[in-house]
């Protein structure tokens, strides 16, 4: 672990540069503990795949004193087994999975194989970012590794489920994006007026549904 300045009023705690459950557990343990101790002058704590960024008010906190405090902390380990599992229905119909045929051709898989690989895994929410509630999910089957689109779309619909490199994720709002869209979920992933459905460290399992079920759930 290394603690480095990140501009004039921020620092970054950098763990090993490896996307893995081991490093995720370190990030999660540190993040949960830092939230619980309410450090004076700290404005925001932002976890990522292999790091945590801390923003602070330079009138009440300085890099050197904050680093000294962080180094002295005894961080309890949060075990992966305590994470909750959230099941999310996804419709992979071609009307909604607007890139599923391109993914099929590029990966040499049938649509049924894409669905089977995508739904057979229990994913870990490594981090949230890009837009409120956007989940970066680790654990994607290697058969589904595929690069982002060369030219991002100007608008991806809310609920779209996509692939990008070694990740999968869900667009919680309609936003621009370059992930390969293979389906959509009818449920709302994020709302400013509700408690978050999913948080960093949770686990996600996708459940395939047909188009009529999607439309029914969407209307509800």
Image (cartoon, grey):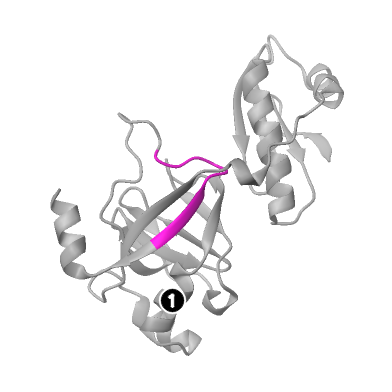
Residue 43 visible (yes or no): yes
User: Residue at point 58% right, 67% down?
Assistant: 166
97 over 126 or under it: above or below: below
In this image, 157 relative to 29: left or right?
A: left
In this image, 29 relative to 156: left or right?
A: right
Nearer to the camera, 50 or 53:
50
Instruction: Kindly indicate the quadrant of the structure image that contains residue 58.
Output: top right
Residue 150 visible (yes or no): no
Provide residue 151's location: percent of width, then percent of height: 43, 70
User: Residue at point 40% right, 55% down?
Assistant: 170
**Image quadrant containing the N terminus:** top right
Within 10 Å of disc 1 (Cα), the crowding (few <14, some 14-19, many 20+) is: few
143 over 80 or under it: above or below: below
Q: Please, what secondary structure does the residue beneath circle 1 have?
A: helix
Residue pointed to by mark 1? 116
Provide residue 47's location: percent of width, then percent of height: 62, 38
């Amino acid at each position: 672990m290394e603690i480095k300045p990140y501009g004039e009023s921020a620092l970054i705690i950098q763990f090993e540069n490896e996307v893995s459950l081991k490093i995720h557990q370190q990030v999660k343990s540190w993040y949960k503990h830092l939230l619980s101790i309410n450090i004076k002058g700290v404005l925001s704590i932002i976890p990522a795949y292999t790091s945590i960024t801390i923003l602070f008010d330079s009138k009440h906190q300085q890099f050197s004193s904050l680093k000294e405090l962080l180094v002295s902390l005894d961080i309890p380990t949060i075990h992966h087994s305590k994470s909750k599992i959230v099941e999310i229905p996804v419709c992979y119909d071609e009307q909604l999975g607007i890139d599923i045929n391109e993914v099929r051709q590029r990966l040499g898989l049938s649509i049924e194989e894409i669905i089977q690989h995508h739904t057979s895994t229990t994913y870990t929410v490594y981090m949230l970012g890009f837009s409120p509630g956007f989940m970066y999910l680790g654990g994607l089957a290697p058969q589904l590794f595929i690069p982002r689109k060369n030219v991002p779309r100007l608008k991806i619909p809310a609920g779209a489920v996509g692939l990008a490199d070694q990740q999968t994720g869900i667009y919680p709002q309609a936003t621009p994006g370059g992930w390969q869209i293979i389906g959509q979920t009818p449920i709302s992933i994020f709302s400013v007026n509700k408690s978050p459905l999913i948080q960093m460290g949770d686990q996600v399992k996708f459940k395939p549904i047909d188009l009529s079920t999607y439309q029914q759930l969407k209307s509800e």
